[in-house]
Amino acid sequence: MKEKQKIIWLTGASSGIGEALAYQWSKEGHFLILSARREEELVRVQNNCQNPKACKIFPLDLSKQTDIEAAANVVLNEFGHVDILVHNGGISQRSLVEDTIIDVDRKIMEVDYFSGVILTKKLLPSMLENKKGHIVAISSITGLFGFPLRSAYCAAKHAMHGFYETLWTEIHSKGIDVTIVCPGRISTNISLHALTKEGKPHGEIDPAQEKGMTAELCAKKIIKAVQKRKKEVYIGKTELLMVYFKRYIPFLYYKLASKIKPT
Ligand SMILES: NC(=O)c1ccc[n+]([C@@H]2O[C@H](COP(=O)([O-])OP(=O)(O)OC[C@H]3O[C@@H](n4cnc5c(N)ncnc54)[C@H](OP(=O)(O)O)[C@@H]3O)[C@@H](O)[C@H]2O)c1
């Protein structure tokens, strides 16, 4: 392994932002551990990386604690440590609170929130022992305000902020960094797999999603934020204004949010 080569574990590496991160980090010469459920997609991403030999595929289901813990045990046994852990795997939602069955709320919390908590707790002891490591939590701007049809998704992303911000306060003085990333609209398949009120895939690429920032540019900005050891970063286009409206002109946020045509 080269001296500056880092071991980076990326969840959600089979498409979108995770896939784009894999290509860019591979170009920089790092060793990648790629996780998601679809093994054939992970193989495709591995083969498209600059150095497929410096990639290990680790299929897992983020809704299953046993999968996550087993994967972490194997990774720690094989590599001893992970330099950068990226909690990126996730699913979105397209359903009103009043219609959504509770299983959907639980599934989204498991995949988008608890999976990261479980994996963090598994890898943190080795990071603390080595006095180094970087945990990157891919949240969303909807982790900072409510948005129609995304109740469970917003809840999971808000929970991430509470957890990872607290984690930063506890471990930053021990040599470990935590970066919370809040993308706006990024052009990926996220809406395709978003859950409906009964937990079925939404099955459509929303037009607004398509017009979002490219996953490649988003990945570039995430990597820059990680290099600069930023605590929190917002990535997107004009939709980022909602973050500042909510914070500094809340009445404007409430006015706009209540008028948003849900998609
Ligand atoms: N696109 C946006 O506009 C946007 C905005 C804000 C935040 N984000 C966040 O960015 C992250 C990546 O999303 P994306 O936009 O790149 O969407 P994407 O292309 O749909 O990618 C989602 C990734 O998560 C994985 N995943 C989903 N459910 C999983 C499960 N149960 N177990 C393991 N892996 C699972 C998927 O792989 P498999 O299906 O192979 O398992 C896929 O690799 C998510 O956390 C999302 O919330 C996206």
Image (cartoon, rainbow, N blue to C red):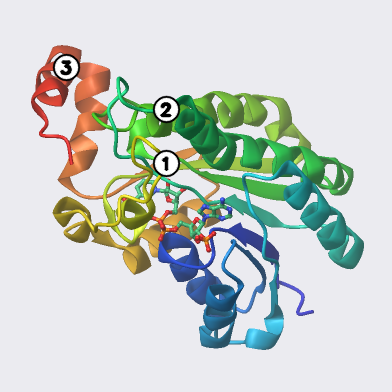
Q: Which residue is mark 3?
A: 254
105 relative to 217 in the view: left or right: right
Point out the tag, 1 or 3, that comes first from the N-terminus: 1
Classify mark 3: helix, strand or loop.
Answer: helix
Residue 157 makes an appearance in the image: yes
Classify mark 2: helix, strand or loop.
Answer: loop
Residue 132 makes an appearance in the image: no
24 relative to 130 in the view: left or right: left
Give residue 50's position: percent from left, percent from top: 55, 86
Q: Residues within 10 Å of mark 1 (few under 14, many from 20)?
A: many
Q: Which mark is residue 102?
A: none
Cβ atoms under marks 1 and 2 closer than 8 Å: yes
Q: Which residue is mark 1?
A: 199
Mark 1 near ligand 1 (CB under 8 Å)?
no
Q: Nearer the viewer, mark 1 or mark 3?
A: 1
Mark 3 near ligand 1 (CB under 8 Å)?
no
Give how far apart the Cα atoms at labels 1 and 3 are.
28 Å
**Dot 1 amino acid type:** Gly
Viewer-proximal residue among 111 and 2 = 111
The residue located at (49%, 37%) in the rendering is 108
The residue located at (37%, 51%) in the rendering is 201
Q: Which mark is residue 101?
A: 2
Specify the quadrant that holds the C terminus: top left
